[in-house]
Image (cartoon, coloured by chain):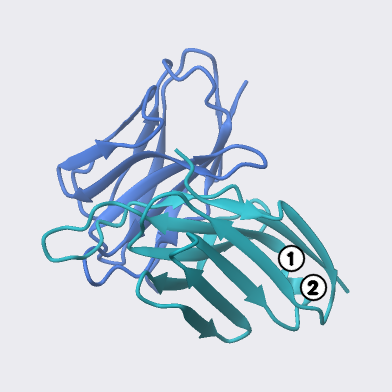
Amino acid sequence: SQQGEEDPQALSIQEGENATMNCSYKTSINNLQWYRQNSGRGLVHLILIRSNEREKHSGRLRVTLDTSKKSSSLLITASRAADTASYFCATDGQPQNAGGTSYGKLTFGQGTILTVHP
Amino acid sequence: DGGITQSPKYLFRKEGQNVTLSCEQNLNHDAMYWYRQDPGQGLRLIYYSQIVNDFQKGDIAEGYSVSREKKESFPLTVTSAQKNPTAFYLCASSKLGHLFGGYTFGSGTRLTVV
C-alpha cells in the first residue's frame, strides 16, 4: 500500500528559485526519507529524518517533519537545472524490534516531478 | 568502490517465459529489496530479505519469486504467472537496526514483454 502522498505532483520553477515539496503519510513512523530519481535511473538517498527530529539540513536541502500532522516537507534552495528530477518520500513505518530500531522496509510515495528551467 | 549492480539494463521477455533479473551488492548490507516502478508511479515492494536464506513477500509478490543463497545476491525471477510484467525493476540494499540509514539503489532493469 502507498503510505506517502506527495504534493504537488509536478513543479516547474526558474533557476535560483526555491522548490518546496510536501509529503503526507497515514500511520506512525520510525523515520522518513527523501530520494531523488533522474529519468530512467535508480533512486539516490538524499536525507533521513527520524521521528524525534523536527528539522534537518544537508547542503541546499532542508527537511522538516511534523509527526502531529503526519507530514514532511523538502526544501531545495537556490535551485539549479541539474536539480531537475523526480523526488520521492519514503516512510519506515514497521513496528520496531525489541531494541527499538528499524527493520528497514520502506513505503514510497508517488513522487513530485521537479523541472528547473535555466 | 562499493555499490549495487543490476543486470541486465534492458530485458525482453516473450509471453510464457520466465526471466531472472540479477542484483549483486558489495556493501556488506544485511537487507535487500525488490521494487517495481510503473510509468509516472511510485515504487511498490515485491519481495525483501533481511537475512540469508530468508525472505518475505511485499505488496505485489504474485507472479514473482526470489532466492537469497548469499548475502551479496538477491535475484528476482519474473514468472509466466505475472500477467503484466512490463515495468522498471529496482533492487536496493540497506543496513538494519540502529545502523539503518536509507537504501542504496541499483540502476534498474527495464523489462518489456514482446
Helix, strand or loop status at disc 2: helix
Residue at the spot x=22%, y=71% of the render?
B98
Residue shown at the point (67%, 42%) measured from the top left: B40
Chain A as rendered: colour: cyan
* Residue B90: percent from left, percent from top: 48, 47
Left or right relative to B50: residue B45: right
Whole-percent x and y of residue A81?
79, 73
How packed mark 2 is, by other alpha carbons closer than 10 Å (few <14, some 14-19, many 20 or more), is some
Q: Which quadrant is the N terminus of chain A positioned in?
A: top left
The residue marked by circle 1 belongs to what chain? A
Disc on res. A84? 1
Please give the residue where the numbered disc 2 appears in the rendered image.
A81
Residue A95 horizontal side relative to residue A106, left or right: left
Q: Position of residue A53 (x, y in %)?
A: 40, 77
Q: Does the residue at mark 2 contact the one at mark 1 (Cβ under 8 Å)? A: yes
* Chain rendered blue: B
